[in-house]
Image: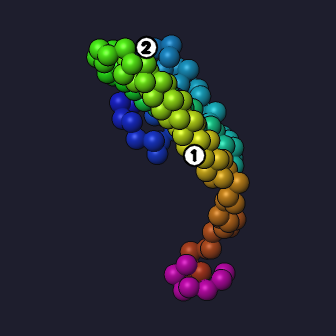
Amino acid sequence: MNETADISHLDNFLVPARELNAGETAVWRSTAYQYSKLNGAAQKEAYALALTGKLQDYMQALFIGLQDPAWARVEQVRDPRGREMAETFTAVTMNQTARIMAGLQLSASQQFNAIVTEPLPEMPTTRPGFWARVLGGAA
């Protein structure tokens, strides 16, 4: 239904990139309708949660993708002394990388949650009448 990775649209988090079957489409339409009935604050909260989940998926995939190449380079070290140092170094740097990435994720999540607490703009409750709009005064 939606093949873009644009994070500015909530449906990109909720709808898989593959084509939906009829049952999934019905569920999605129902969910979209229910989401549209939420007030602005609830929509912002749902969006912040979706951003946090999407970021966690991305960070985990990135970290896991670092593992095989790093350990493959360690396997290339033939000298047992160098190999032991390379293993220690890789373990320590992977641990540090995990902590840094977790910190970045926490920081970003807190910023996403700050979006939720920002006040919504005040919207006018009544629309001026036709003549008020034409003449620029209050009617």
Q: Is residue 54 visible?
A: no
How many numbered circles are shown?
2
Confirm whether the magenta stretch covers residue 109: no
Label 1 environment density (alpha carbons within 10 Å; few <14, some 14–19, many ≥20): some
Residue 42's place in the image compared with 56, above or below, is: below
The answer to which image quadrant residue 117 occupies is bottom right
Where in the figure is residue 123, as x and y percent of width and height? Answer: 65, 64
User: Could you say whether the residue bearing mark 2 is in a helix, strand or loop?
Assistant: loop
Q: Which amino acid does label 2 sit on?
A: Asn
Q: Name the residue under label 1.
A: 108
Where in the figure is residue 63, as x and y percent of width and height? Answer: 46, 28
Q: Which of marks 1 and 2 is in front?
A: 1
> 29 and 94: which one is in front?
94
Q: Can residue 115 be seen in this view?
A: yes
> 2 and 83: which one is in front?
83
In the image, what residue occupies the spot 45% across and 42% down?
A: 7
In the image, what residue occupies the spot 48% across and 32% down?
A: 93
Does the residue at mark 1 contact the one at mark 2 (Cβ under 8 Å)? no
Report the Cα–Cα distance between label 1 and label 2: 34 Å
Label 2 environment density (alpha carbons within 10 Å; few <14, some 14–19, many ≥20): few
Q: Name the residue under label 2.
A: 21
Where in the figure is residue 82, as x and y percent of width and height? Answer: 36, 22
> 126 and 105: which one is in front?
105
The answer to which image quadrant residue 73 occupies is top left
In the image, what residue occupies the spot 46% across and 14% down?
A: 22
Residue 3's place in the image compared with 6, above or below, is: above
Task: Pick whichever of labels 1 and 2 is earlier in the sequence.
Answer: 2
In the image, what residue occupies the spot 54% across and 40% down?
A: 100
Magenta segment range?
Answer: 133-139
The disc label shown at residue 1, or none: none
Quadrant (top left, top right, bottom left, bottom right) of the N terminus: top left
User: Could you say whether the residue bearing mark 1 is in a helix, strand or loop?
Assistant: helix
